Amino acid sequence: MANLVEIRNLKVEAKTDSGRTVEIIRDVSFDIAEGEIVALIGESGSGKTTIALTLMGHTRPGCRFSGGAVNLAGHDMAALPQKRLAALRGTEVAYVPQSAAAAFNPAQKIMDQVIEVVRIHDLMPVEEARERAIDLFRALALPNPETIGARYPHQVSGGQLQRLSAAMALIGDPKLVIFDEPTTALDVTTQIEVLRAFKSVMKKGGLAGVYVSHDLAVVAQIADRIVVLRGGEIQEIGTTAQILSSPAHPYTKQLVGAFEPSLRVAPEPMERATRQPLLEVHNLSAGYGPIQPNGLPLALALKSVDIRLEPGRNLGIIGESGCGKSTLARAIAGILPPVGGHIIFDGKQLTPNARHRQREELRKLQIVFQFADTALNPTKSIADILSRPLVFYHDMPRLEREARIDQLLDMVHLPRSAKYRRPAELSGGQKQRINLARALAAEPKLILCDEITSALDTVVAAAIIDLLKELQRELDLSYIFISHDLSVVRAICDEIAVMYAGEKIEQISPTDFGGAGGHPYSRLLSSSVPKLNPGWLDSLEQDPELVRAFSKR
Amino acid sequence: MAPFALSPKKLGYRFNVVGIVGLTIILLWALAAIFAPLLTPYPIGEIVDYDYFGPMSAKFFMGTDYLGRDIFSRILMGARYTVGISLAAVTIACVTGVALGMSAAVAGGWFDACLSRFLDALNSIPSKLFGLVVVAAVGSSIPVLILTLAVIYTPGAYRFSRALAVNINTMDYVTVARARGEKTGYLIRSEILPNILGPVLADLGLRFVFIVLLLSGLSFLGLGVQPPNADWGALVRENIGGLPFGAAAVIFPSIAIASLTISVNLLIDNLPQKIRDRSA
């Protein structure tokens, strides 16, 4: 088979804000055969999207080609002038972006946007293009293929929009389609449907593709070969089976290893009867918007939720976006005062609003957020950030405080010199460690972790999970760990509470999760998590009734 | 702030060249304002030249005005009014406006609603008209002028800082501080203010220029600084008749106003990276 794409010694450089030039892609070479799907995998900043964009002859603002060639069906995309590139884009190579919601114009009907490529290149009459679009909608398993084009982007779901953006890419009959993390923003149950649609369309048309992702399990389902990237360099290229079963490069091994974190070894269940629960939540309801005449807020996000947590144990809360799991954390912390129910923490009932809680009660319950960078004040040094809870809760004198900050930084495995820095000078994983250290500074009994690893790369997230486990062994701590990622929750929690549409569906142990005895939604969720096995997607069979009942696609 | 956090880097408030130029001119004018009585070659009200609109000469450094008074002396004394009144007014306006704006953003609810509507109402009165009414009713004195100018420019500063603070208020680090149990005072002072300081200072520079111009306008109407004293705006206005003759008496007060307002903005736009970064 002839090579459709040949990338040879590609170099891309970028200008930093301070005017320095850095090489972000260093000497990358690989091929894509016709009809082959190649995945580019790596952590954020590894250059995977930059490489994918060079296939369209595009570099992001501030970047430029500094060497090498990108041959696509006989054209050197790195050297062609803009006008020639414009003629190739949409007809030879097409792009499916990460966020379909941002890629569609909210003021235009979907059909007009899907067939725009055809109009720009004048490929076929509009009527024919519409028919072709409807065929594509059907091939992508979209509901109501005849009429969906008449809707506006906000009238369809996220998963549908992502498939529609694939239709937009495919309508010009390109030879190569670039998928840039197309399922990253989707829920796991939705992701399956989208992946299936992509895979069947690509295989049917014999199209070549580049699939950019950080998720090895997703890539395993769709790609023929995998290119592992780090720091703008290729670490390893191999077939999907080879990368997964026998990774050669240490970094690939780390990546594959991070995917399967070890299950938590639960502490010995002590005489349960004698231990009073650390946290008990009864009938908790909370929501957003003005209070209605019936005493409930306009949008009720949390409907009568009960949870119970014993000291030293960890509770995982899992569910898809919009199920109310973050609202639960905010309601417990008193940031969003609940409208109903009560919270008993450490033997005392807490007032709904954090403002009216005792300082000592606040101290024992700390919260850590998903986005590490917005949770740290950019104008303060790390020492200032960490010393505030020490002053606020413990009234610690200066010298003692200094020693304690060093100790906290040691605890989260950061160098002591980090205290002189500002948040912007730290990486994402380091910032999340500072957030943890700030929570630990209060000497809490319970830490609410709201998706704390979701914004981090796989390897970094695995390290944070290990750190959490280690801290728990050393300090008398409990976690409520909120996540949409089942493998993360399984790795750290003794119990899992499953949430759906604002309600807790069940609370079971991780080993029983997804088992036959559990709630059907838990089973669906459990079976939807991609596995590293390349044949997983094809062999996956889900009860269509169940899927229809619980997914909002 | 803990003293040990003062790393050597933190002390490095480095201005760039343009910033230094701006700062130097402002400092020169400030010095001129302070030492004006010692520097003036002639008493400001005294007619020293037999000719009006006299040219620049060795005797009269910047020429003479429409009555034959020495312009150089009048500009030096005018600096006291222009720089002093404007600076005091802009400081009062920005400090109250920013403090109220941040409080409104953090407190929200009825406090925010009442304050915003009240200041909107104040904003709806044309500034010149408001100045005229107040000065006409109470009489013109320097404290009245300063307060009037401050009141006129407070709603703008309030609106601006409230808009910025509302954005910062939704950041997770403010939520974390709230969950920690921090009081409103701490939230405003320590979490929000440092993050809006850059734009607020830039706004202060702009507002300063507006105040200089409004003060000149009031002086022209006879409601500002009273003769024989004059601020720079008044100097331009009273000598405007000399423009067809190319009189130095019009040019130099204009240059004085321009040099001050431009250098204030040069300084603000080129504040040390350390301060500007805070709002990035």
Image (tube, helix red, strand yellow):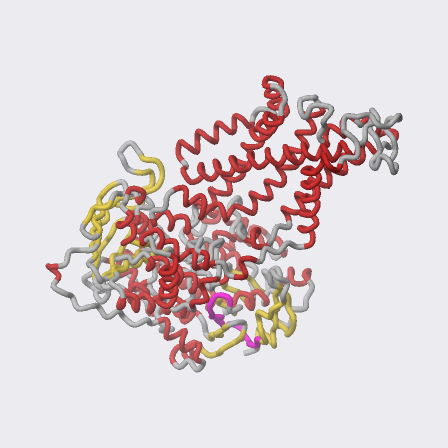
Name the residue rendered at 68%, 66% in the picture: A80
Name the residue rendered at 14%, 59% in the picture: A275
Residue A279 coordinates in the image, percent (x, y): 21, 53
Does residue B272 appear to the left or right of A297 in the view shown?
A: right
Does residue A544 appear to the left or right of B262 in the view shown?
A: left
On whether residue A424 falls in the magenta region, the answer is: no
On whether residue A31 falls in the magenta region, the answer is: yes
Which sits in the foreground, A61 or A74? A61
Does residue B16 appear to the left or right of B98 in the view shown?
A: right
Dividing the picture into quarters, in which one does residue A456 lie?
bottom left
User: How many marks on residues?
Assistant: 0
Which sits in the foreground, A197 or A346? A346
Q: Say above or below: A196 vs A34.
A: above
Name the residue rendered at 34%, 70% in the picture: A531
Does residue B240 appear to the left or right of B166 in the view shown?
A: right
Residue B259 coordinates in the image, percent (x, y): 73, 41
Residue A163 in view in this figure: no
Q: Say above or below: A418 vs B88.
A: below
Span of residues in magenta: A28-45
Q: Say above or below: A516 vs A160.
A: below
